[in-house]
Amino acid sequence: LINKIMGTRHYQTVINKKGVTKVAQYGQWDGYPSGQGKDILTYLKSGNLEAYQKHLDALREPTKKECKVIDADPNWNKTYPYLSRDCGSKIHQMIEEGIVKFVALMDTEEADKWCEGFYTIDFSTNEFTSEYHGTKSVFPIDNLPTEEEYLNVMESKEEE
């Protein structure tokens, strides 16, 4: 229960087939494996990855003009929910549906200083990597574990 009320910071990265980082995003909540990790795994197992990759390739950073519009919008987090620290793994479904028009790429070195969970979808290597408190597991996207297997691996590594 305590994990459900705590802010557990995480960082998500998505790399396209060409090896280009298209998403590098901070999230404030549920950054542990049974939170965002499990949710990303679930998306990868059930999402339309072909549509996802098509829309992923079209993502870009916002222009200066777009940034000014976003900054001036008092409801920016509702207008652009995919830019919010509250978005988390929901961004993947939004990308698949073509809702995400642009992303703000966060510096990985900065995230390393204060994030507990790191989740990477890498289409250039066909891998999903989960890292939490320094324990790391890599899973082939075309042979992902069940939710139970994933959590057993991540939890057993945490205990080592």
Image (cartoon, rainbow, N blue to C red):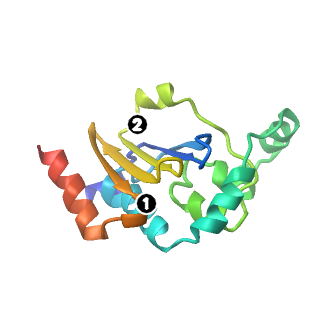
- Tell me the residue at 54%/71% (across/down): 47
Quarter of the C terminus within the rendering = top left
Q: Dot 1 surroundings within 10 Å: few (below 14), some, or many (20 or more)?
A: some
The answer to whether any part of residue 38 appears in the image is yes
Give the vertical position of 4 relative to 10 (above or below): below
Decide if residue 70 is on the left or right side of residue 84: right
Viewer-side residue, 123 vs 62? 123
Task: Work out whether mark 1 precedes mark 2 in sequence or the reverse, and give the earlier one.
Answer: 2
Residue that sits furthest to the left in the current view = 160
Residue that sits furthest to the right in the current view = 65
Whole-percent x, y for residue 72 in the image: 82, 41
- Tell me the residue at 27%/55% (across/down): 2
Give the vertical position of 122 relative to 149 (above or below): above
The amino acid type, in three-letter code, at marker 2 is Cys
The answer to whether any part of residue 77 appears in the image is no
Depth-wise, is mark 1 or mark 2 nearer the camera? 1
Dot 2 lies on which element?
loop
Q: Which residue is mark 2?
A: 115
Q: Which residue is mark 1?
A: 141
